[in-house]
Amino acid sequence: MKEKTKKVFRQLEKQRREIIELYYSLDRHQLLYRPKAGQWNLLQVMRHLVTAEQQSLIYIKRKLIHAETSSSTGVGAFIRHLLLKMALYSPLKFKAPKVAEVREEAPDLDEMKAEWDAVRDEFRTIIEENSAETLAKAVYKHPRAGLLNVKQALEFMEAHISHHQKQMERLIKN
């Protein structure tokens, strides 16, 4: 379990590095472009991704303090996780949960990168410092899929970013 979790984390980090590289290759106009009022620009998309991961990290850290009282995830979590990933890879659109809503018009790219770096450093530490048994515990609560383990949380994040990469591509093409 631990090696599989590390592998997912490495893939997630590769995905994040590519996005950051892309954002730094764009000019301010491209980063702020919004096709319609009420739709996010590229900076707002990143703000959403960073905020979602920050909130996930807070929850996981809180649950890990008492991980011994949490049960391991089972078939139900596997099915909910699979359905969640399928939904994110579909063309469907979803309203962001309140905790991951974006209020800023033009979030600062450098600040968000630093925040995202810090979040990922903490996830790396969680993976390194916890046993496979602890990582298999239901310590992440997704707003729609319920309780998942750390590997499933990271796989959700990867699917979540992929979902928003389609949005990024549309914004860059315009």
Image: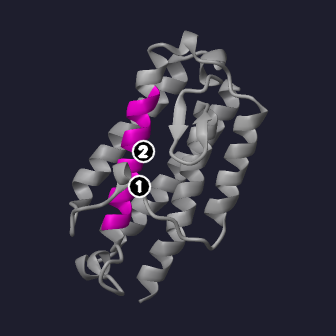
Question: What amino acid does circle 1 point to?
Answer: Leu
State the residue at coordinates (55%, 17%).
130
When the figure is inspected, residue 92 is found, relative to residue 71, above or below; the finding is below
Nearest the viewer among 94 and 156 is: 94
Looking at the rendering, the stretch of residues picked out in magenta corresponds to 44-60
Circle 1 sits in a helix, a strand or a loop, which is it? helix
Name the residue tied to disc 2.
53
> Quick one: quadrant of the C terminus?
bottom left
Marks 2/1 in contact by CB < 8 Å: the verdict is yes
Q: Which residue lies at the image location 25% right of the left edge and 82% below the top edge?
A: 29
Q: Residues within 10 Å of mark 1 (few under 14, many from 20)?
A: many
Q: In the rendering, at what x and y percent does residue 170 appear?
A: 48, 81
Magenta span: predominant SS is helix
Q: Which residue is mark 1?
A: 49
Residue 24 visible at all = no
Question: Mark 2 is on which residue type?
Answer: Glu
Q: Is residue 103 magenta?
A: no
Q: Nearer the viewer, residue 74 or 127?
A: 74
Q: Is residue 146 above or below residue 138?
A: below
Q: Is residue 84 left or right of residue 106?
A: right
